[in-house]
Structure formats: C-alpha cells, structure tokens
Image: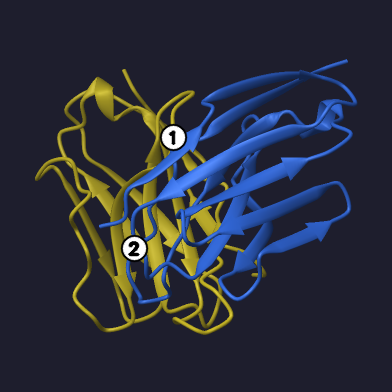
Chain colours: A blue, B yellow
Amino acid sequence: GENVEQHPSTLSVQEGDSAVIKCTYSDSASNYFPWYKQELGKRPQLIIDIRSNVGEKKDQRIAVTLNKTAKHFSLHITETQPEDSAVYFCAPNNNAGNMLTFGGGTRLMVKP
Amino acid sequence: GAGVSQSPSNKVTEKGKDVELRCDPISGHTALYWYRQRLGQGLEFLIYFQGNSAPDKSGLPSDRFSAERTGESVSTLTIQRTQQEDSAVYLCASSLAVTRSGNTIYFGEGSWLTVV
C-alpha cells in the first residue's frame, strides 16, 4: 500500500504570513494529489487537487505544487487568516480503485 | 440527499454493547469508505467497498468490527462488544467509480461514538 507522510505535524504562523505543508508518498503510480481541510468538529473537505500532468495549480490564496520525480507535493497558503486554522490532510492516489491512505494531518494555527 | 448521510450523529453506549452505524452515500457513488478518527488524531482506514468487488477489510482493527454494503447503496458498520477505546468519530465517505478526473471523496458528518 501507499506510505504517506506529512510535515510538519503542527504549524503555527502569524496572520498574514505564508504556510507550507509537504506530503511525501511512496507509490510512483500515484497520479492524483488532493488536499483536504478539516475544521474543528467538522468533516474533511477537498480544498484543492492536482493531477500528474500539471506541476502547479493555484486557487486564490492556496496553491499546490507537485514534484513527481521526488514523490512529494505541497500545499501553500499565502496571506493566512484565522479561518485557515484547521487540520490539513493529503491523500495521494492512483485511481486504481484502491482504498485511500491519508497523511497523518498537519494542524495549522494562524494567530491573529 | 445531496451529500453523504450518516446516522446516528451521536451515540453513547455502555461498554460491552453492540452498535450499528449507518452510511448513505451520494447517489451513483460506487466507492464507499469507512474511517475512524480519535480525538485530535488522523484518519484511520477501516474498510473500503468498490462496486461489486470484494471489500478491502485490511483496516478493521479486530473481529469485533464488521461492515456490510448492499449493492451500491447503504452501508452499515457494526461494532460488537464495544470497548472504551472504540470511542471516536466514525467517518463515512464515498466517491464515483475510478475515473481519469481523480478520486475525490466526499465525507459525511460522522457518527460520534462514546463508550462509557
């Protein structure tokens, strides 16, 4: 199965600063790379994803970059706001119909 | 409904009792997942159903845990002889069949289980 690791496990930033979370994976066949956000007491929800034919994707203040050679992809949040405080999970997969393995999660705290 | 529906949303049970948790996936989603999330922890895979294929049960922590799914519809997760360490949120998720566009999964609100 896929081995997925996230770093850091916790991240504290000042409002307005940038945050970067990295996800490394083991399956070279992975071709879909989503990030999920889970606010306290809520369900995880997809916030951005990228496919293997693209190196970077941006959506307003969030972006995801992919390095397939090194088998990692990263979530970038610029101009962080308190509402960005949440746990973020990555879940790289290969669309082969296998179960999804999530990273261990990164708890982001944005201090006002 | 429009999203993944889970019931009950909250369940308090006595140690040793059996519980049944229900998940109603998004219509048309052939893949269905159960995850367990303990307080402040990550998403622990339990079981995965994909269409009519044999389910992937590799994440079930013990033989007290079982799950069923009828066709491509409702799934139930059963925990027998509950223990205090079973206390957690049980999240169900579903997705479309494997496609080129990516395997985005949609989570339900979860069933919060407390074993006392």
Residue assigned mark 2: A99
Residue at x-position 22% and y-position 49%: B59
Residue at mark 1 shares a chain with residue at mark 2? no
The front one of B43 and B9 is B43
In the drawing, does residue B22 fall left or right of residue B16?
Answer: right
Specify the amino acid type for callout 2. Answer: Met
The front one of B110 and A57 is A57
Tag 2, which chain? A
Residue at x-position 48% and y-position 37%: A6
Say which element carries label 2: loop
Say which element carries label 1: loop
Residue assigned mark 1: B42
Specify the amino acid type for callout 1. Answer: Gly
Q: Estimate the x, y position of residue B29 in percent, counting from the top left.
A: 49, 77
In the picture shown, does residue A63 fall above or below A9?
below
Q: Quadrant of the N terminus of chain B?
A: bottom right
Q: Quadrant of the C terminus of chain B?
A: top left
In the rendered image, which quarter is residue B88 located in? top left
In the picture shown, does residue A24 fall above or below B3?
above
The front one of B49 and A27 is A27
Q: Residues within 10 Å of mark 1 (few under 14, many from 20)?
A: some
